[in-house]
Image (cartoon, coloured by chain):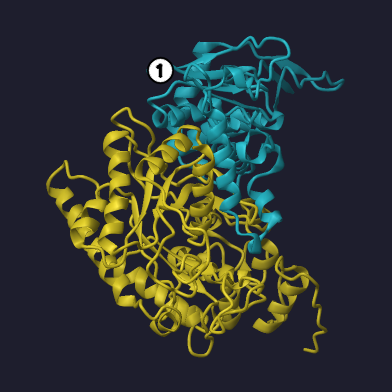
Chain colours: A cyan, B yellow
Amino acid sequence: MIYIFDGSLPGLLTAVFEWFERKPGKVVLKSIEMFQPEAFAESFTVITDAAKADRVWTGLQKKLTKASLRKFYCSYLSEIPEAYNHLFQFSVYIFKHAAGADSNYGNEHVMALAKYAKSVEREKHRMEAFIRFQKTGDGLFYASIDPDFNVLPIISSHFKNRYADQQWVIYDLKRKYGLHYNLETVSEITIGFAEGINKQKPAPGLMDENEALYATLWKDYFKSANIVARKNTKLHVQHVPKRYWKYLTEKIDV
Amino acid sequence: MSDRIREKLNILADAAKYDVSCSSSGGTRKNDNKGLGNSHVSGICHTYTEDGRCVSLLKILLTNHCIYDCLFCVSRKSNDIKRAAFTVDEVVDLTMNFYRRNYIEGLFLSSGIFKNADFTMERLLLVVKKLRLEQNYNGYIHLKTIPGASDELIKEAGLYADRMSINLEMPTEAGLKLLAPEKNHADVIKPLDFVQKQITQFSADKKLIKHIPKFVPAGQSTQMVIGATPESDKDIMYTANAFYRNFSLKRVYYSGYVPISNDSRMPVLGTQPPLLRENRLYQTDWLMRFYGFKVQEILNDANPNLDVDIDPKLSWAIRNMQHFPVDINQADYRMILRIPGIGVMSAQKIVQARKFGKLRIDQLKKIGIAYNKAKHFIICADSPYQLKDYQGTQIKAFILAESKSKYLKTDNNQMLLF
């Protein structure tokens, strides 16, 4: 039996609700995007229902530690097709067992969530490290990203707390939405970029007059801090994988 | 204007880079005045230089003018290099602008000694006060304590800095005397001790009175240069251990000496820095701090130096085969931590998971232990029955045969006779 859901978190939670209502035996959960009809498997389309989703979420909150609930949410943000099924199986497992089952790392779904969460948390941490703001002419600090996972929801508070006295925008080019902080609150935005505009590095005319100077000073610093006698390219690339270089002011040649 | 500041930054960042401390962890400062910045509990490495070292802080000297002539130091008086000095405003401006762009986690400010200790310390204090009081800056500040500076200045600096540090430089007094006759360990111990006592005092007061200002919330650290003088690994780690114990240090850093001088008392220019040795010392440091090992178990008169070909935990295990194999499903957490191939996270997962049933090999692999290493030291639910009781040396040979050290440029597969 295949359960198909719309890819949203409420959809996933509704699927758990439906399973307990119907008890159809062994089920695999797939998102509609990934679903391809199979000749010999029945399928059931889950209709997302906020009330049912809420009940499942409240149930999970009761049964899981805060850390496990965070792992659950992070795994969902990974957007990995197999993760959806693990989340589904994990929920069923949790509801069938007494509280505390979320620390059974011998269970494949508990372990799978721990791994997905680790990857997502790592990506979150990398974004906190590798985002580079550029100051625009009107004093806004702008950064564009295209992270492996959908981490904007979990990096928001870090940047809000840290950069409380400057307006900033972090824009996910891959998922086509961003966050804007207006000195009071953070809100989700979408930007309609004009044709041909460089989304990563706006034209120098739009930037603060000192932006280029500080970027240069930072590159200088990056070079000066290196100890040539200790060169270790392998370690360097291990810490800063090449796919992130495009964000990094110090790794972009002018 | 911009050319001059670029030149200063190049000189003063270059001179500061031999201080290896980069950590920005352990701070507790919050951005509750709606200013700029806060502490991140685990710290953030914002980039890595091409030598693979983390860049977390803007690490600079206020000046590289210095009245001392320490042989191991690139800023020594007799060295013919370009000298420069930042103004207070320049340091503040660089810090604020780098921080706003998310380049850095904070400032690491050190200095050569110009005129005298108090004059230098006063200047450092001016920078941190300006950042904290005028700019509402709550980001991380690591400040060097200048040996010989007055207690009042050190105490005031501690109110604004997150971490303070002062370097031992050489692991033993004899080593230090050889290369820096004007210095001694006592000059380092006095301020370390003073700051430690203040930290204790402030945290005792905090229990009674709520609104006590923070005092060096991220604690103190120190650094030793490795390989410039002939100390053994035992000398180094025993010194480190004593400093961890006596001054509750957060970190001791081991900096492999990079030759910068042709003096006959030191390794000649062009000698490779002792990177592998540095790595083994850090591994030992971690075993002491996170794995419950006593330094005497790892290094002692019979074993004054760490093995080069295997890590210190494995080395300890094969010298102490009487403790193994360890039953994964029964043993105490502390014993599981001691198994080669199992780290802190895996050990915690094992202890939690085994409550739900006896663990098997496939589960251990999924939990993430280095099974090929650990298998020689453990029993679990489906361990294969072993007829032969292997010696530690044989196990070492097995493990070496199937692993390749990243430090060995060429394989040295020597034939084993036994």
Q: Give the image location of residue A240, x and y in percent.
A: 64, 45
Question: Can residue A220 be seen?
Answer: yes
Query: In the displayed structure, does residue B199 sit left or right of residue B46?
Result: left
Which residue is under mark 1? A185
Q: Nearer the viewer, residue B40 or B229?
A: B229
Chain containing mark 1: A
* Amino acid type assigned to the residue bearing label 1 in the image: Thr
Q: Give the image location of residue B328, x and y in percent.
A: 56, 63
Q: Is residue A115 above or below residue A87?
A: below
Identify which residue is drawn at 61% across, 49% down. Answer: A223
Q: Residue furthest right?
A: A39
Q: Is residue B252 above or below residue A39?
A: below
Viewport quadrant of the C terminus of chain A? top right
Q: Nearer the viewer, residue A237 or A122?
A: A237
Q: Give the image location of residue A125, x and y in percent.
A: 54, 39
Viewport quadrant of the N terminus of chain A? top right
Identify which residue is drawn at 50% across, 59% down. Answer: B15
Q: Give the image location of residue B24, x and y in percent.
A: 43, 49
Question: Can residue A98 be seen?
Answer: no
